[in-house]
Amino acid sequence: RDVTLLNAFLPILLPGVAAQIQHIIEMAYDAAGWGGNGSIDGEIGSTVPLPEVTKLGFRGAEHLVYNKLSKGIYQSEQNDNNKKSTVSKYDPIYSVIIPLVSNEYYNGGDIYFEEQTFRDGERETHKHLFEAEQYNAFVYLSDTSHGAEEMDIGHREMFKIDFWSLDDTPYYYKAKAHPLLPPEFVEVYAWKMENKAASAEEGEASSVEFPTLQEVNDYLVVNKRETVKLD
């Protein structure tokens, strides 16, 4: 599969989309009763209440492109917390998958989620299959094992988004600076991204970090604009 990491771009450039996905998780949260129980602590049969998505931060987003591979596997089984028995604050809590391409353009590839239960002291695994209809949202706890059946032929695209217990990405600077940054920070961040894209064409791409207050004010001074302060 080919993965394009959108991460912080989604809430910055498409805040309406991010808000709508958050609302979808809220509906799933109420329907599933996650406020009363869950399994995000990694223990089967746990009854630990899960947090409301409004109290979580946006962790990241991915645009996934799948094509027929040599062995016919579209997506192997996976777990967004990497099957760890315990999770950390850096792991996602809720995940959403949205098919972007109609299933008329490929064969197979049904999405499945695995449920772990105990019977007579023995662990049993139950696989639940769902047809990946275009624009249907699949909301699940990120520690749930999931994957897809073999795709015989075709091309498909998926959109995936995660929420975690930390602030919206890039959380590291926002946590140190101020919970509500002036819009000039987003403007400078986008400007730095554009410069990175231009450098990539010249073979000089470099990583881009969220701007500091000094970088923002330097940018504003060059453009003959009033500088900003953080209270």
Image: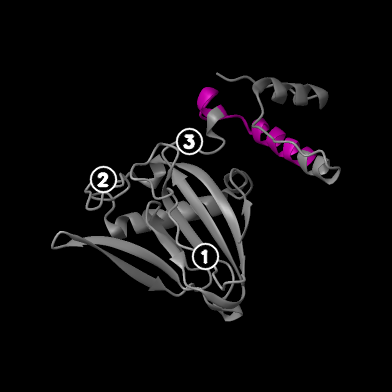
Tell me which corner region of the image, top left, top right, bottom left or bottom right, holds residue 85: top left
- Tell me the kind of residue under disc 2: Pro
- Tell me the kind of residue under disc 3: Asp
Q: Position of residue 57 (x, y in %)?
A: 46, 40
Crowding at dot 3, Cα within 10 Å, few <14 / some 14-19 / many 20+, comes out as some
Crowding at dot 2, Cα within 10 Å, few <14 / some 14-19 / many 20+, comes out as some
Residue wearing tag 3:
167
Q: Position of residue 104 (x, y in %)?
A: 58, 81
How did the renderer colour the structure? Answer: one colour
Chief secondary structure of the magenta portion: helix
Q: Earlier in the sequence, mark 2 or mark 1?
A: 2
| Camera-side residue of 51 and 225 | 51
Disc number for residue 49: 2
Task: Identify the secondary structure beneath mark 1.
Answer: loop
Left or right of 138 on screen, residue 73? right
Quadrant of the frame with the N terminus:
bottom right
Residue wearing tag 1:
75
| Camera-side residue of 115 and 61 | 115
Q: Are marks 2 and 3 in contact (CB under 8 Å)?
A: no
Q: Position of residue 9 (x, y in %)?
A: 62, 45
Q: Is residue 25 above or below residue 176?
A: below
Q: Are marks 2 and 1 in contact (CB under 8 Å)?
A: no
Specify the segment rendered in magenta: 173-195
Measure the C-alpha gap from mark 2 to mark 1: 31 Å
Q: Residue at x 45, y 57 (%)?
A: 78
Q: Residue at x 41, y 59 (%)?
A: 139
Task: Identify the secondary structure beneath mark 3.
Answer: loop
- Residue at the right extreme, as displayed: 202
Q: Position of residue 28 (x, y in %)?
A: 36, 58
Disc number for residue 53: none
